[in-house]
Amino acid sequence: MSKAISKVPPVIFMFWVIKILATTVGETGGDALSMTLGLGYAVASLIFLAFFAVTLVMQVTSRRYHPFFYWAVVVATTTVGTTLSDYLDRTAGLGYVTSSTFLFCAVLAVLLAWHLAVGRIRFEDISTRKEEVFYWATILVSNTLGTALGDFMATSTGLGFERGALVFAALLAIIAAAHYGSKKIPPAVLFWAAYVLTRPLGATLGDTLTKAHREGGLALGRIASSLGIAALMAAGIFLMTRWEGRRASSSAAI
C-alpha cells in the first residue's frame, strides 16, 4: 500500500519566516479593505470569508501539497482573522479580553475535537481529509485569536505596537528554546503554541508599519505595505520550494 502524500510543507526555519509574513500581510490587507477602502469590518469579513472558502476548496481538493494553494489559505485565514476579530472587539463591543478568552477556548475546543475524532493531533503530516479539516479549522480560529491578542497587548496594556511585537517575539524565542532544549513537551503542543503567537507578532508588526505616527506607527500606508510584504512572502515561498525540490532530488538519487 502506498503511503499517503502529506499536503503541508516541512516545518523548517523558512516556514516560520513565511508564516510571520503571511500574518503581517493579513493585518495590513485586512485593515486596507475594512479601513482604507471604507468597507467596514462586517463587509470585509464576508469578502475574506469568500476568499477563504475558494482557497480552502482548492487546497482540500488537490491531491498533493501545492505551495500556492497552501499559503493562499493561510493568508485568507489571517485576513479573515483580522476583520472578524476587529468586528467582535469593536463593532460587537466584546472588547479584547472577552474576545481573546472566547477565541482561546475555541482553539482548545477544536484541538480537543481533533484529538477525540482522530486520536492524535499532528502538524507535519496531514494526509487525510478529516485531519485537513481540523488543521485548517485550528488555523482559522488561532489566527483570529492572534489578532485580538495583538490588539490587547498593544492597546489595552499600553505597550504600543513595537514593544508588543517584542513581547511576542520573546515568547516565540522561549518556545524555540523549549523545542531544542526539552524532550518532555510534545512537538504538537510547541507547534500550535508558536502558530498562535506568530499571529499577534504579525499583527503588531503590521500595525507598526501602517498606523499613524501619533499612534506609534510608521504611517507607510496599508495597500503599499501589503503589496511589499506579499512580494517578500512570494520570494520566501519560491526559495522554500526550490529547497524542497533539491531535497527531493537528493533523496531520489540515494
Image (spheres, rainbow, N blue to C red):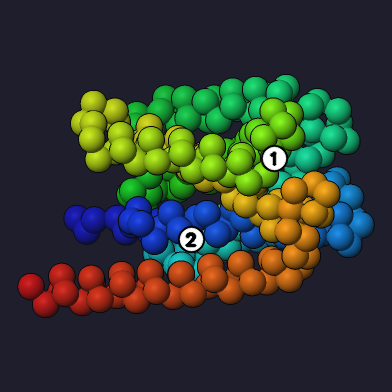
**Rendered view: 163 above or below 63:** above
In x, y percent, where is residue 76? 64, 56
Q: Which residue is mark 2?
A: 18
In the displayed structure, does residue 49 sit left or right of residue 173? Answer: right
In the displayed structure, does residue 66 sit left or right of residue 205? Answer: left
Specify the farthest residue to the right. 38
Mark in the foreground, 1 or 2 = 1
Q: Which residue is mark 1?
A: 160
In x, y percent, where is residue 244? 31, 70
| Labels 1 and 2 touching (C-beta < 8 A) | no
Separation (CA) of disc 1 from disc 2: 24 Å
In the displayed structure, does residue 134 sit left or right of residue 72? Answer: left
**Rendered view: 197 above or below 1:** above
Is residue 30 visible in this depiction of the protein?
no
Quarter residue 163 falls in: top right
Q: Residue at x 86, y 60 (%)?
A: 36
In x, y percent, where is residue 206? 66, 54
Q: Residues within 10 Å of mark 1 (few under 14, many from 20)?
A: many
Label of residue 95 in the image? none
Q: Residues within 10 Å of mark 2 (few under 14, many from 20)?
A: many
Q: Tell me the SS state at disc 1.
A: helix
Type of amino acid at the residue the image marks with label 1: Gly
In the displayed structure, does residue 119 sit left or right of residue 201? Answer: left
Q: Residue at x 43, y 54 (%)?
A: 16
Quarter residue 232 falls in: bottom right
Q: Quadrant of the N terminus?
A: bottom left
Q: Residue at x 82, y 39 (%)?
A: 87
In x, y percent, where is residue 160? 69, 40
Q: Tell me the SS state at disc 2.
A: helix
Which of the two labelled residues, at mark 1 and mark 2, occupies the earlier sequence position?
2
Type of amino acid at the residue the image marks with label 2: Ile
Is residue 217 visible in this depiction of the protein?
yes
